[in-house]
Image: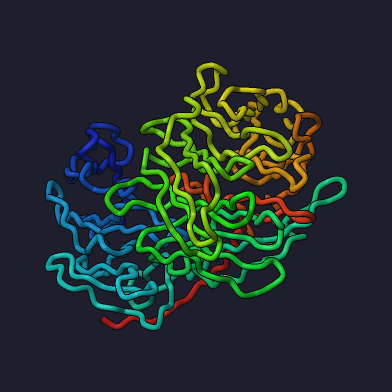
């Protein structure tokens, strides 16, 4: 809404490459519609930086500023820029770089200068830039106050901002003998700082050590760490310039497979290393986006799901584990093992083959990733666990806004003895469920959607990342979950300008 309350501004995509901003006189419909600006070249901007997001009017109602990406408060790794349109029919002008996170613009009363939030010098602070002559922005706050959303008083003499802090740790939640437990029953077993994030994790075969991905620098990538469950010290295993994630232990506990982002494209390769971080070697080049890997029971084969390029589940194998202790055996060339895509695949405990969330499996008629399939060592479908029959049983608990029934069997994890499967039972990852490994009665084990504590089981659905951060690992007596904590305050400061 414009400052005088007579108009509003909105944008729409005229084409895949062109965004148009319009103003509308309230109450006049299309008769009061006016093209304010047109911006092209968006296809050259890396997704999901696809704005404008949040149009901001100047006090005189003649100018508009906007960032080109929404400000997800717990996503520190992305970048964004701020642009301005100085007059109706003008061309948008970018007034910040796109190498940092520049967000939340607010006009000063002179209709010329913009306050905004940026991490250009490290932690977030408030900066000011001249929209007519955008040179180097000047810093307004110091000391890493970490402001997020800004609000300026009408006379421009006072600034209020929200300070938001977020972190994600691994929590241990006791497995109840009966009924279910709240996330409030759990406790963190890692101790990361604010703006640090733990994602996917996996327990060693002896159940004593957990490997996990951690982004310690909010502007950096993920790396693989490990720590003993009973200790406090954690050991960093990888330190590559790219991001490393999704660690999975080998059955003998001597190796870890993980994904490594490629620096030359938006895709990943599969790597294996020793459990102490040594002997890193690439075992499978990118076939698109990896949908997780796991080992065969003897440790001689690796299975990895890929999507969407070269979609399917691929295998690499070797003839022995090691020639000598310090000489791992190389894997051979990858081959297509199963022509459907296996998401979140896990080796069957106490049996052969893998279970996974299937996608695009024409033989089984599966098009989503709600159902679970059991594949033999030869890649044949042994059994399918359909999510549909379970929906009615949970209809009072898990009903979307449209009133339909919804049920997911997603991210399966076996108990150490192989008798029980644990998984997330809804797309928002707020319920951990279990059932006998061969199928049978469902049990609701953990409730993560508990408003009695400021914890969230997943990153809010920004760029689909919630699929990777709602991680689940099963121990002898506990479930291990990646859980976020957040807190916020409001600050007010005087301005002189």
Residue 194 appears in the rendering: yes
**What residue is at 68 percent from the left and 73 percent from the top?**
231
Residue nearest the viewer, comparing 304 with 307: 304
Q: What number of labels is visible?
A: 0
**What residue is at 12 percent from the left and 46 percent from the top?**
89
Report whether 162 appears left or right of 253.
left
- Identify the image's colour scheme: rainbow, by chain, secondary structure or one colour: rainbow
Q: Name the spot of residue 153 as percent of width and height, x first.
A: 37, 71
* 328 lies above or below 496: above
Q: Name the spot of residue 171 as percent of width and height, x first.
A: 67, 61
Residue 164 appears in the rendering: no
Residue nearest the viewer, comparing 178 with 96: 178
Q: Name the spot of residue 74 as percent of width and height, x first.
A: 48, 60
Report whether 283 appears left or right of 359.
left
* 43 lies above or below 441: below
* 138 lies above or below 451: below
Residue nearest the viewer, comparing 320 with 40: 320
| Quarter of the picture holding the C terminus | bottom left
Q: Residue furthest front?
A: 323
Q: Name the spot of residue 373 as percent of width and height, x first.
A: 62, 28
Report whether 228 appears left or right of 22.
right
| The image quarter in which residue 386 lies | top right
| The image quarter in which residue 334 lies | top left
* 17 lies above or below 223: above
**What residue is at 22 percent from the left and 73 percent from the top?**
137
**What residue is at 59 percent from the left and 57 percent from the top?**
254
């Amino acid at each position: 809404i414009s400052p005088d309350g007579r108009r509003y501004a909105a944008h729409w995509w005229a084409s895949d490459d062109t965004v148009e901003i319009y103003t509308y006189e309230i109450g006049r419909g299309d008769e009061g519609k006016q093209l304010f600006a047109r911006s092209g070249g968006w296809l050259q901007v890396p997704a999901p930086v696809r704005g404008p997001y949040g149009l901001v009017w100047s006090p005189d109602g003649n100018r508009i500023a906007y960032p080109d990406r929404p400000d997800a408060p717990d996503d520190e790794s992305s970048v964004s820029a701020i642009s301005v349109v100085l007059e109706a029919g003008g061309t948008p002008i970018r007034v910040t770089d796109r190498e940092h996170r520049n967000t939340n613009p607010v006009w000063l009363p002179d209709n010329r200068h913009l306050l905004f939030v940026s991490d250009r010098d490290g932690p977030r602070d408030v900066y000011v830039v001249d929209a007519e002559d955008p040179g180097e922005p000047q810093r307004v706050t110091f000391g890493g106050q970490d402001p997020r959303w800004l609000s300026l008083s009408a006379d421009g003499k006072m600034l209020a901002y929200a300070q938001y802090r977020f972190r994600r740790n691994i929590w241990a939640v006791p497995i109840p003998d009966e009924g279910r437990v709240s996330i409030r029953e759990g406790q963190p077993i890692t101790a990361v700082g604010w703006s640090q994030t733990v994602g996917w994790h996996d327990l060693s075969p002896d159940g004593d050590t957990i490997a996990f991905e951690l982004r310690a620098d909010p502007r950096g990538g993920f790396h693989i760490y490990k720590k003993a469950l009973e200790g406090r010290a954690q050991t960093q295993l990888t330190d590559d310039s790219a991001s490393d994630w999704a660690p999975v232990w080998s059955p003998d506990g001597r190796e870890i497979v993980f994904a490594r982002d490629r620096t030359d494209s938006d895709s990943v390769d599969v790597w294996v290393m020793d459990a102490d971080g040594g002997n890193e070697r690439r075992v499978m080049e990118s076939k698109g986006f990896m949908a997780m890997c796991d080992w065969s029971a003897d440790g001689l084969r690796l299975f990895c799901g890929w999507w969407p390029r070269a979609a399917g589940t691929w295998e690499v194998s070797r003839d022995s584990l090691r020639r000598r202790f310090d000489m791992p055996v190389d894997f051979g060339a990858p081959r297509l093992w199963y022509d459907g895509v296996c998401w979140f695949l896990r080796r069957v405990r106490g049996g052969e083959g893998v279970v996974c969330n299937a996608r695009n499996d024409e033989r089984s008629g599966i098009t989503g990733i709600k159902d679970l399939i059991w594949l033999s060592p030869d890649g044949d479908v042994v059994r399918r666990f359909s999510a549909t029959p379970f929906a009615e049983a949970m209809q009072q608990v898990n009903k979307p806004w449209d009133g339909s029934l919804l049920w997911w069997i997603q991210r399966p994890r076996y108990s150490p003895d192989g008798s029980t499967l644990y998984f997330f039972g809804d797309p928002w990852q707020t319920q951990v469920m279990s059932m006998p490994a061969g199928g049978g009665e469902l049990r609701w084990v953990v409730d993560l959607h508990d408003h009695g504590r400021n914890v969230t089981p997943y990153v809010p659905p920004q760029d689909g990342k919630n699929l990777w951060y709602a991680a689940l690992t099963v121990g002898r007596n506990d479930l291990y979950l990646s859980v976020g904590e957040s807190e916020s305050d409001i600050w007010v400061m005087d301005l002189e300008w």
